[in-house]
Image (cartoon, rainbow, N blue to C red):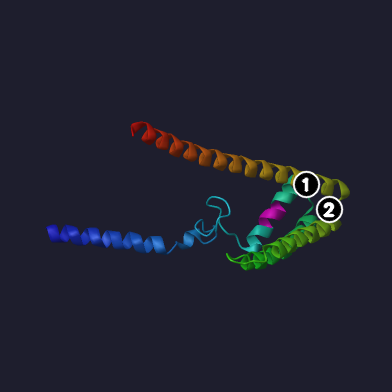
């Protein structure tokens, strides 16, 4: 009886381990949350097509695009997403040419904006730019908050260490 229970336990552990290694086909369309490489928490990777679809849909909703505008914007976003995927692949740890890579990313974004300018009406493009500015400001604010939190946490650790050293000196 004990052997049978042990055998069932080992089989169950083996099965759950095997399932954890192979994601099910039900999750095939969703990003892999373990493959974020330090970019966000649990943020997965979408294919360039998925990314282009999401961007075009979001833009269509925000700016009330016509179906033709949405299709043209999707094509622009697909080109950008494919290019960014290539650039992201070049951004490996130890790559000393990060500034040149950052310049290429900025150029790709500028090209995308210029192409979108040809698709959107002047009012829509102004709304698009204003929205992007707001998003960039929000991103910078969050980055600053994270930096401040890290500095504060680091300062607290140093303070605790110095307090411990003072305690040791007093005890001696």
Q: Is residue 40 left or right of residue 67?
A: left
Q: Quadrant of residue 160?
A: top left
Secondary structure of the residue carrying tag 2 is loop
**Which residue position holds label 2?**
120
Looking at the rendering, the stretch of residues picked out in magenta corresponds to 53-57
Dot 1, crowdedness within 10 Å: few (<14), some or many (≥20)?
A: some
> Magenta span: helix, strand or loop, mainly?
helix
Residue drawn 44% across the image and 61% down it: 24
Work out whether residue 141 can be spotted: yes
Work out how far the residue at label 1 is from the one at label 2, CA to CA, in angstroms.
9 Å
Q: Where does residue 85 sit, x and y in percent of width and height?
A: 65, 65
The percent position of residue 100, horizontal first and vertical second, equals: 72, 65
At x 52% / y 42%, what residue is drawn? Answer: 154
Label of residue 63 in the image: 1
For the C terminus, the quadrant is top left
Circle nearer the N terminus (1, 2): 1
Q: Is residue 97 above or below residue 9?
A: below
Q: Nearer the viewer, residue 32 or 164?
A: 164
Q: Farthest residue to the top: give it.
A: 170
Task: Looking at the picture, tell me which residue is in the foreground, 150 or 155.
Answer: 155
């Amino acid at each position: 009886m004990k052997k049978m229970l042990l055998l069932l336990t080992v089989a169950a552990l083996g099965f759950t381990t095997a399932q954890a290694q192979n994601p099910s086909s039900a999750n095939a369309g969703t990003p892999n949350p373990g493959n974020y490489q330090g970019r966000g928490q649990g943020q997965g990777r979408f294919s360039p097509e998925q990314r282009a679809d999401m961007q075009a849909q979001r833009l269509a909703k925000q700016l009330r695009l016509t179906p033709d505008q949405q299709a043209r914007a999707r094509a622009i976003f697909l080109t950008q997403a494919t290019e960014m995927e290539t650039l992201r692949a070049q951004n490996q740890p130890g790559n000393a040419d990060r500034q040149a890579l950052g310049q290429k990313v900025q150029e790709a974004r500028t090209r995308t904006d210029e192409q979108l300018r040809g698709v959107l009406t002047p009012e829509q493009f102004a709304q698009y730019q204003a929205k992007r500015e707001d998003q960039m400001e929000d991103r910078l604010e969050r980055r600053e908050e994270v930096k401040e939190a890290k500095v504060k946490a680091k300062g607290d650790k140093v303070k605790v260490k110095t307090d411990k050293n003072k305690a040791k000196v007093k005890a001696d």
